[in-house]
Amino acid sequence: MDSKTPYAIAYLGNIVDLLEYADTNNIHIDLLSDQTSCHAVYDGGYCPAGITFEERTRLLAEDRETFRKLVDETLRRHYNVIKNLTSKGVYFFDYGNSFLKSIYDIGIKEISKNGRDDKGGFIFPSYVEDILGPELFDYGYGPFRWVCLSGKKEDLLKTDAAALELVNPNRRYQDRDNYMWIKDADENGLVVGTQARIFYQDAMSRTQIALKFNDMVRKGEIGPVMLGRDHHDVSGTDSPFRETSNIKDGSNIMADMATQCFAGNAARGMTMIALHNGGGVGIGKSINGGFGMVLDGSKRVDDILSQAMPWDVMGGVARRAWARNPHSIETVIEFNKNNEGTDHITLPYIVNENLIEKLVK
Ligand SMILES: NC(=O)c1ccc[n+]([C@@H]2O[C@H](COP(=O)([O-])OP(=O)(O)OC[C@H]3O[C@@H](n4cnc5c(N)ncnc54)[C@H](O)[C@@H]3O)[C@@H](O)[C@H]2O)c1
């Protein structure tokens, strides 16, 4: 393999040993992250360096204090080597596993942006700040999903075809990617049990697809369908180290957005609603508000979908707009235009500092 060929490494050993080897031998890494289970860092999610897996398992069961000490030592080495590597041009980002938070929690305050506490985020970005937020969540794209309750594959294929008809692959590159995902889903054999699909879509498209599916149920073309979504979505999760890390209107350090999302879904009549702690980043580090909605073909369900589906997404887009994330502002302007006379999201009007100064003078 020549040095220009991109490749990823599969390595059986401690990540810290590998990174220290790369550092000492000046092996360049373009893109680096971490996906150890740091959300449960002292419960076996993160393996200390220098001991075997068997020894780690024994310590975990019999000597938690030593285990904890070894985890902390490894995290410290992990941070130091990432610092060295990034100083040589490696791009590091947090994958949403609470890695940066774990480093902060062992007392390495310099990892926090303000050098004081974790409220202002960390010196390395989370992938939500850099990628998922600006490219997807700010527009309202998130993991909408459905389950064909009949259990029949033919129902899933009919829903795939119906969803595809409602997505315009030429609107944005995100739509094109999502369109290809569903187009190729059956061929790629993604279903292992339940006849279910996951599909990144925005508020408008999720609502249209949901209404279309309900109409198909009404006409007897398919059996009932259950809608839902992942917790890792636009409005449903408050997690300062992940989902809300780029909502800097204050939502990033609060836990009210998911609660509002959940309560609004309940008020609008969703079939099943849930508010819970945990999600991917760990207990105590996030609040998730989820929903399930059964499509039975009724007019009652049409009414619920028309109100609850946009609510479930636009609450988060609104927060992102209030945080002045540019794509969210564009999305809210479009939403307000399309819903004139019925729904309206307030927008931040950004002060023209020069004008104020002129007026004061
Ligand atoms: N960003 C996302 O969308 C997203 C999605 C899924 C999971 N996550 C988070 O990512 C983390 C991992 O998730 P998972 O489902 O892959 O968990 P997992 O527990 O199945 O895998 C973690 C792996 O890390 C290995 N590991 C632990 N410490 C190590 C060390 N020091 N060196 C080398 N390997 C080590 C473990 O042996 C294990 O194989 C979790 O914290 C999870 O919450 C994020």
Image (spheres, rainbow, N blue to C red):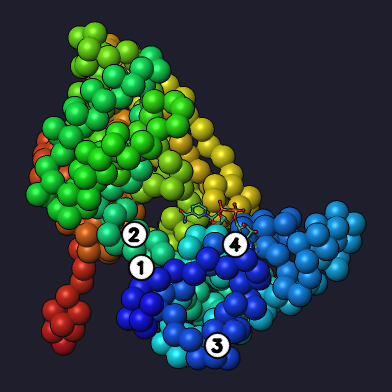
The CB of the residue at mark 3 lies under 8 Å from ligand 1: no
Tag 2 and tag 1, C-beta contact below 8 Å: yes
The answer to whether residue 120 is visible is no
Foreground mark, 4 or 1?
A: 4
CA separation in Å, label 4 and label 2: 22 Å
Find disc 1 in the rendering and name its residue: 130
Closer to us: mark 2 or mark 3? 3
Q: Position of residue 135 (x, y in %)?
A: 27, 59
Name the residue at 63% across, 76% down: 16
Q: Residue at x 78, y 70 (%)?
A: 51
Q: Secondary structure at mark 1?
A: helix
Q: Which residue is mark 4?
A: 36
Residue assigned mark 3? 23
User: Ligand 1 is found in which quarter of the picture?
Assistant: bottom right
Amino acid, disc 2: Gly
Residue at the image position 62 percent from the left and 66 percent from the top: 12
Q: Which residue occupies the foreground of this view, 270 or 198?
A: 198
For badge 1, the amino acid type reads Asp
**Proximity of marks 3 and 1: CB atoms separated by less than 8 Å:** no
Which amino acid type is shown beneath numbered disc 4?
Thr
The residue under label 2 is 133
Neighbourhood count class around disc 1 (C-alpha, 10 Å): few under 14, some 14–19, many 20 upward: some
Residue 257 screen position, x and y as percent: 43, 47
* Proximity of marks 4 and 1: CB atoms separated by less than 8 Å: no
